[in-house]
Each structure stands twice: as structure tokens, then as C-alpha cells.
Amino acid sequence: MTQSDPSPQATSFTPPAELARSAELTATGLVAGFRSGAVSPVEATQAALEAIERYDGLVNAFVLVDAEGALAAAKESEVRWQRGEPLGPGDGVPTSIKDALWTKGWPTLRGSTMIDEAGPWDEDAPAVARLRETGAVILGKTTTPEYSWKGVTDSYKYGATGNPWDPSKTSGGSSGGSATAVGLGMGVWSLGTDGGGSVRIPAAFTGTVALKPTYGLIPLFPPSAFGTLSHAGPMTRTVRDTAALLDVVTGFDARDWSAMPTPGTSFLAGIDDGVAGLKIAYSSDLGFVDNQPEIEELVWAAVGVLADAGAEVTEVDPGFADPVDAFNVLWWSGAAKVLSAYTVDDRVDPGLRRVAELGSSYTASDFLDATAERMELGRLMGRFHQQYDVLITPTLPITAFPVGQDVPDGWSSPDWTSWTPYTYPFNLTQQPALSVPCGFTKAGLPVGLQVVAPRHQDALTLRVGQAYQAATDWHSRTPTLEAR
């Protein structure tokens, strides 16, 4: 078991061809290979570990790697596949876990210097338990900012995480380590969390796929200090892999009072049904967002792909004002709760200290007013989806900016919520929201397309995302880190 170097390094590698071929396989492709005997879980795990060895010093995606344990688990999986007795649909798939989710036997330090590494660490989070039950090979844990409080990934504990396409740029956050790991073939699956965009932001910045599911679909334990804004979510390279991982990590868990019943149907069922006849609402700016022009052009082109596939597209805004103030009251209050257990000093991210101080100034009435605004937003979106099957927006209005910063250079606000206006509204409403890559800027940075569906219609977001990926190849493009 090793811990990664805390900061990206200015070196580079180009993987050998055989490693690239293995690392670029999808989870569904790997499972098909395991079944046929064309590839083994040991080979897949070795490829993932080799990618970690080659790339993690550049991007700092992992806080913990257990190569010995992963290879042992892969050998056990290989025996099961040879016997025709896999534990489940994820048996042998190399996987990582964001260091915000409990993993039995490993510390969950959440990017903080204040958590006692000694533990005890004797329990898995529900989704991690489901991964073990299916036989997934857990490689290690990925980086997060302190307590996952912001939309980029850096911390005093572990340093900053770089972008696969340019390590001098941020990976986004707070699940930035997971997105970067998936983007560079350091495992084909990762499990993140999303309280205001934390799987979708890094997916957009890194050219990967991530779903924030309907709240409660993936149980959480222990509960988040940020309350019912926080979701767990799958992070992969393709929509099909996202659906496959969602199949694994959903399932009722009595430790979560808001856990939904175990789904009775696979999320892969109907994923290839296409979009013909679907009513898609496209909003380029939600009525209040300024986008970088290239982003608007690429998302508009992506909407055209869906229209060409038979969707009925209407350009329309959902009709709500920016709910950032309500979100900030709820999120900053959570930050205050996080730090209330500690004597806060200069070991804590200064941005987290600042918003926690704001959060501690709010009254119960402020919190209830924000909750009422949240409920009204949910009502409005519920009515909106009586007319439109899904809403399409950009995932973010900007591309990745320099690593180690909370906001872009010269930005008008110090708050991460000032540049994530498309993500946090749908944490407030608890709707499923999927980010898929839809192109690259002239500077070579990825852009994301967001698909939002009504609550409990997670399969619909996947169906739309899959229809887009079936007609494009952005998701199949892989970064090559060049010498600097």
C-alpha cells in the first residue's frame, strides 16, 4: 500500500501500445473479455497499475494505491471467471473510490489534516460494499479537496490534481481524482460524490462521463454534513459503463434513511432505444449564464446531433432565476457543521474557513427560507418535465483553468459556485443529471454536455447520452501527456 506524491510533476510518459490497448478497454468490454477468456482480470489490473505508475506523478489522482491487494483480488476474480462463477457483473473490473467514501481497512481522510488516520476503519459505505460483493478490483482511493467542499481538487493534505489533457489545468472537483484516473486509464470505473456538481464538473473538464443520480438511488453512509444535497455517482469513460456501474452500486441499505428500493430493472435495459420522438428542451444559458463562445458552439452542435437522431428539440429556458444564494446558504451551513467538530487553525483550507464562517452566521429562518426556495424550484422543474422529457444545457460555462486555484484568473467572485451555474440547481431539485463529452476547444480542452431528466428517470438520461455517444466519438479520444 502506497500513497501518491502530493503534487503533479513536470515529466511525461507515452504508454507502450499494449498498455494503451488494455487501458482503453471499457468495463463492459473487459467483462465480455473475461467471459470469453480473451483477457483476464489480472491483465486488466496490471494495465491499470502500470498506468498509475506512469501517470500519477504527473496528475496526483490517487491518495492511496494498494497494488498488492488489487493483484490478489484480480487473481481470485480470474479463478472465478475460469470456473464460470463470477460474483457479479463487475467481477474483476479495476475500480477506484473517491476518498470521501468509507472503505473498510483503509483510512478515509477526505483531504483533511484533522482526521485521525488510525481509525478504526471497519465499515464500507453502501456503494463500496456493493462493489466488493460484485468482485470489483479496488485499486485505491482518489483525491478530493478538504471535505469535498469546492469545485476543484486540491488540499493541504494531498496537494493539487491536474487535468489529463493538460496537468497545468485543474481536473475540476470535488471528484477530480476519480475523473483524472478514469481519463488516463488508471482503472475504468470510479465512484465519486456530487453535492453541487462534484462528479459532473470534473467530467466536463476531463472529457469523461459522470452521472449524479436521483437522490437516494445510491445509498450513502455515513450521511453527509451537507445533507440531502450530496449524492454518490458513477464516473467512467462511456455512458454504457456508467449504466453498468450504476447497476452495481444501487441497492437498498438500511443505514440510509432516504435509500430508495433496489431497482428491479438493469440500467442497461433500453439504453440503445435512441431519442426518436423524445421532447428535448435546450437551454443555452438557463436565462442567466454567460458562456465561453466555443462552449456554446459545441453544445449547440451536440443538440443538432440529437435532433438529427429524431428528437424534437425546442430552445427554451426552464424559467427560474439563479438559485445560488439559496444553495450557498445550505452549502455554507454544511461547511460550518463540518468544522464545528474541530479547533480550526491554519491547517484548514482558507476558503473552507471563510465559507464556514459565513455558514455559522445563518439563522434557522435563513435555512428554512433556502429550503423553501429549493422546494419551489423542484415544483417548477416537475411541471417543466410534464412538457419536456429532458433538459439539455452545457455542463459548465468555462473550460479548465490553472490548477491550484478555486476560480479562474481575474474572476469576479472567490466562490466556486460562481462558475458552476448549470450543476448545483439540480442538486437542489435532486434530479438525475448526466455529463458527457461533446468536443474540444481550439486549445484542446474538453467541453461537457449536461442531460437532466425528471426525478427517478435516471435511465432516460443514460438513453439520451448513449444516443449522442453512438453518433459521435468524443468519448473515445484519449489524452497523451507530452513532454514539457
Image (cartoon, helix red, strand yellow):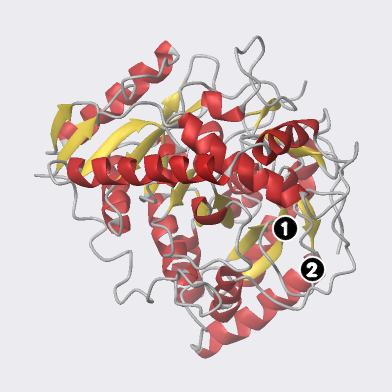
Q: Residue at x 62, y 70 (%)?
A: 125
Q: Secondary structure at mark 1?
A: strand
Q: Quadrant of the N terminus?
A: bottom right
Q: Secondary structure at mark 2?
A: loop
Q: Residue at x 48, y 18 (%)?
A: 441
Q: Residue at x 61, y 58 (%)?
A: 224
Q: For this rendering, which residue is in front, 219 or 60?
A: 219
In the picture shown, does residue 87 fall above or below 131? Answer: below
Q: Which amino acid is tagged 1?
A: Lys
Residue 252's x, y, as percent?
Answer: 45, 77
Residue 376's x, y, as percent?
Answer: 31, 42
Q: Which residue is mark 1?
A: 141
Q: Quadrant of the C terminus?
A: top right
Q: Which residue is mark 2?
A: 106
Q: Is residue 144 visible?
A: no
Q: Earlier in the sequence, mark 2 or mark 1?
A: 2
Residue 358's x, y, as percent?
Answer: 67, 33
Q: For this rendering, which residue is in front, 116 or 141?
A: 116
Q: Pointers 2 and 1 in contact (CB under 8 A)?
A: yes
Residue 408's x, y, as percent?
Answer: 63, 17
